Amino acid sequence: MNRTDNKEIHITTIIRSFSCLRTKKDYTFGMKIGYQTIFSFFKNMLISHCINNVTPENIIFQFLTFQKISFVLRLDTIMPRSYLEMKKFFSIAVLVVSFFSSPVISHPFTLSERVKEYDLENGLKVLMVERHQSPTVALSICFKVGSVEEGSGMTGTAHLLEHMLFKGTETLGTKNYAGEKKLLDQIDEKATLLDQERMKGEKADPKKIEELSKGIKELEAEHRKFVVKDEIDSIYLKNGAEGLNAMTGNDTTTYVVSLPSNRIELWARIESDRILNPVLREFYSEREVVREERRQSYESQPDRKLMEIFLAAAFTAHPYRNPIIGWDSDLQFLKRENTQQFFRFHYSPNNAVIAVVGDINPEEVLSLIRKYFGRIPPQYVTAPPIISEPEQKGEKRVKLVFDANPELLIGYHKPTLPHFDDYCFDMIDAVLSQGRTSRLYKKLVEKEKLAVSIETMNGLPGARYPNLFTISATPRAPHTTRELEKAIYQELDRLKREEVSERELTKIKNQLKASRIYRLQSNSGIAHELAYNQTVANDWRYMEKHLEIIEKITPQDIMRVAREYLSEENRTVAELVKRTGARGE
C-alpha cells in the first residue's frame, strides 16, 4: 500500500468518525449542534489541508478563533456529557492531531503521478489507477457517441442501443443462436412492412396492420423460446457485481460495474464480446418499452417536458436540441438494421476509453485487456460534420401550459471547454448557486422569499460543443415566474457592475477544489472522471488542469464574461404556466 493510499484511508476514517458523532440519535439538542459545528469545521480544515497545505499550527489557530474563542463557543453545548461520549470525542481528537502531524499528507492529493496510460494498437485508450483499500475494482468503458451523433429521423438511437446491448451476444442470452437468427430475420421483415404501412397515416390499411401485428407477435412468442433472459446481468450479479449500469448522454455512452478484483477477466470477456458479437434481440418490443418510458418520464413530467421545449428553442440547428430519449415520431420507426449500422460505426476501440481503478496489478490487467479487446478491429469512417449553431440575435421565449406548479428556465449560449470563458462560468455558477451562502439562494430563497428553489448549471446539455449556462427556479406562491425572473436579472446585472470580492472568490475556489476531492473518494468516482474527461476533453488531465486555471481567474475575468454573454439577445427563456381552466378556455 503506498503513502497516498494511507492518506486517503486516514481522511475517510476521520470524516466517518465525525459523521458517527453527528448522526447519533441519543444526545441532546445542544450536543447535536456542537458536534455538527466541530464536524463542519474539521471537514473543511481537512479539505483545506489537502488542497492548500495549511499547516497544523494554522488549523489550531483557526479552531481557537473559529467561534471567537470561548466567549461565543459555549463548551457546555459541544462537550460530551457521558464517559463513553467523552472517550469517543477525545479518540477522534487524537485521530485529527495524528492526521495533521503525519508526513504522508505533506502534498495535496493528485492523480497526475498515479494514472497509468496505455494505447493499444487498435486505438483503444486504457487508463488505470492502483488503490488497494479493498479487493475490488471499478471498471468503466466510455464511448464517444451520444444523441449528438444521431442523424435526422434517428433520434433516440444511441439510448435504445444502450438498452439493446444488455440483451446479449451470439453466445450470451441465447440457447441456440443459429436457430434464433432465422426468427430474428423473419421478425425484421414483417416489422419493416408494418412500419411502412403505419407511415401512411390515415391512408394506412387497418386490416394489413392488424395482420402484420399478429404475425409479429406469433414470431416473437416463438423467438422467446431461444432467449435466456438477462443473462449478462445474472452472470455479473452472481460474481459479486455492484453498480452495474449504463448511461447515455448527449456526448457519451458509458458502461460501468464494480467487481471483486479477481473477476476482471470475466468483465473483459463479457464486454469485449458485447462489442464484437452483439445481437439486438427483442428489438421491436424494446422499442415500445422506450416509447412508454418517454410517455411516462417525459410527456407526463412537467420539469422534463419544460427542459425538452427549452432546449429545442435554444438550439435551432445543433443536435443538442434533440432529447436523448428521442422524439416519438422517430422512435416509433427506428429499424434494427439502422441501429446495427450505428453500432458498427461508433462502438469501435478507437472511439472508446477504458478506465480501471482499484486493487489491481496494471501490467496483468493490461495483458487481459490486450487479449480480449486488442482483437477488436478499429473503424476509420469519416463522420459527417455536426451542424454548428448560428449566433443568436434576439431573446427567445417559450411557454408550457401544464397542470403543475410554475417553473422557470433561463439559458445563455457560451463556449465549452477548454475555452477560458468556460472556466469563468464554473466560477459564476458557484458564486450564484453553490450552497446556502450563494447569492441567489441567500437573496431569492431566504431573504425575499421569491423562490422555493433556485440553481444554476454550467454546460447544459453537453460539453463537446458550445452549450448553455442555465438558471432554473421555482417561484414561491403567490409570486410569479415574471417576478422571479426580474429578480434573477438584477443579480446577473450585479455581476456585470460589481467585482466579486477576493474573499468570495477564495471561498468559491476552495469549494470547487473540495468538490473535486469528493468526486475522487471512490474507485467508481475516479474511473468515471478519468473516462469522461479523456472522452470529452480529449485528455484526462483536464481534471487536473481545471483547478490550475480556476486559480488564475480574477474578479475582472468574471465581470468581463458576465457582460459578454449574459445579455438579453443571447438568452432563451422557458416558462411553465399552471393551467387555470379547461383546455381551450
Image: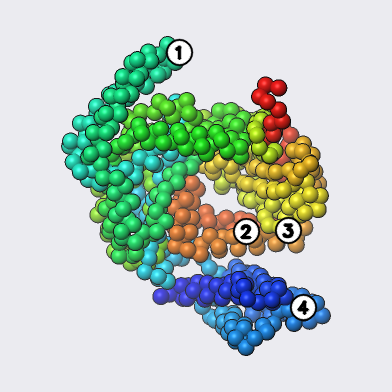
Say whether disc 2 or disc 3 marks the residue closer to the N-terminus.
3
Q: Are marks 2 and 3 in contact (CB under 8 Å)?
A: no
Residue at 74% across, 34% down:
568
Tag 1 secondary structure: helix
Tag 3 secondary structure: loop
From the viewer's side, name the closer residue of 407 and 309. Answer: 407
Using the image, tell me which numbered label, if any, was put on residue 512.
2
In whole angstroms, how far apart are the C-alphas of marks 2 and 4? 29 Å
**Crowding near the residue tagged with mark 1, few <14, some 14–19, many ≥20 C-alpha atoms within 10 Å:** few
Is 562 situated left or right of 261 in this image? right
Residue 332, quarter of picture: top left
Using the image, tell me which numbered label, if any, was put on residue 73.
4
Q: Amino acid at mark 4?
A: Leu
| Colour scheme shown | rainbow
Give x and y (percent) for residue 197: 37, 17
Say whether disc 2 or disc 4 marks the residue closer to the N-terminus.
4
